[in-house]
Amino acid sequence: MNASPSHRPHPAEWTETQSLLPSAERDLPAGRHQFHKEQMMARIHEDLRTSSRTSAASPVAPVKRSNPFLRRTILLPAAAFALAGAVVGGLALTGGGADDGRAALATGPALTTRIGAADAKGAPQLLERISLAAADISAPTPRKGQYIYIASKVADSYVKTDGDKSEAVSNELHSRQVWNSLDGRDGWLIEAGETSDKGITLKSDTPFSGAYNALAGLPTDPDALLQRIYRASDANRDPEVPRDQAAFVAIGDLLFESYPPAEVGAALYKAAAKIPGVVSVDDAVDAMGRHGVAIARQNDTDGERTEWIFDKKTLQFLGERIVVVKATAGNPLKVGTVTHTSAVTERAVVDAAKQVPGQVS
């Protein structure tokens, strides 16, 4: 049965969503979360990229989120499955893609967009409305043994280096399908240009923090929830990422390729309203070209703004994009470049991995 998304359903700038789990208060040495996560993600990434990269004529030097499995500057837990990305409609999408089902590398110029006007005063009211809409969604409660299915369209821009020449490029807007078990220990990924047509398995001994069971165990009091987010972030975040930005993107990660209970989704939006620097944006476009309003926050370190895009009428989550809004010394991409964009096309509960909605298991 399908369940319409009521929220931003990935690339997050948060180090350790795992520690939001009720039973996951761990005292790992500094840097160990990053190490474990990078090891797992590196293995996945290597499996997907080896054949294409070994035959590539030039090296690629991506900026942050060019790697679909390591999009964010703060990390997800070691078991966090690759987050979906997405391409913003209305962007400069040109060039072909990787038609051989291998690596979706440089296929066209960098994606660009008009930067919507930000309004700090409008954010609390908009988030309150989004929270109410999320709480009002009637969706089926998953049963043991079922999977959360998320389908999306994604794309990224990054810097490609060939010898002493560098240029901003994009990969092709492509489809992505993810299945996650309720405990987050088992899943499946099919992503055009990144996996084969059959996809790859996603398994881990550590629960995925965005899994249904983990989300269901989070507090629904916005203040308590935000305190937990900050506590986990302070203990594990990348020191280059500002504290409030880490918390904002952490909430986005907990909502992206997931299926939170309505009351948890509503609480996450109310918690986001309490983070300094959060703004509303009058117009933003998702990967499918759908215009909406957005909740956003700018990371002054790299000049990029993360935007959660919602339908203007229903306030249902449409997708996400990350836009360069300020020139910085550490980011070679121009203002207006979309480094990451996504659009959720379907969200549902299914009976098995690799089963699509409407298909009999």
Image (cartoon, rainbow, N blue to C red):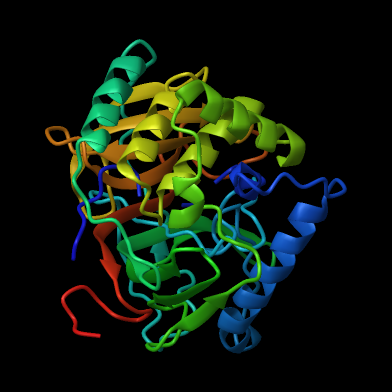
Considering depth in this image, is 215 or 331 the residue closer to the camera?
215
Of all residues shown, which one is farthest toward the left? 313
| Quadrant showing the C terminus | bottom left
| Residue 181: percent from left, percent from top | 44, 69
Residue at left offset 39%, top offset 68% = 144
Considering depth in this image, is 164 or 288 the residue closer to the camera?
288
Q: Residue 318 vs residue 83: left or right?
A: left
Considering depth in this image, is 56 or 240 the residue closer to the camera?
240
Of all residues shown, which one is farthest toward the top? 121
Q: Residue 63 vs residue 183: left or right?
A: right
Q: Residue 156 vs residue 185: left or right?
A: left
Considering depth in this image, is 212 or 329 the residue closer to the camera?
212
Residue at left offset 87%, top offset 48% = 29
| Quadrant showing the N terminus | bottom left
Residue 239 in sight here: no
Residue at left offset 65%, top offset 48% = 23
Residue 81 in sight here: yes
Q: Is residue 197 above or below residue 277?
A: below
Q: Is residue 123 above or below residue 171?
A: above
Q: Residue 204 vs residue 290: left or right?
A: right
Image-quadrant location for residue 19 = top right
Q: Is residue 139 above or below residue 49?
A: above
| Residue 54: percent from left, percent from top | 65, 87
Of all residues shown, which one is farthest toward the right? 29
| Residue 218: percent from left, percent from top | 50, 40
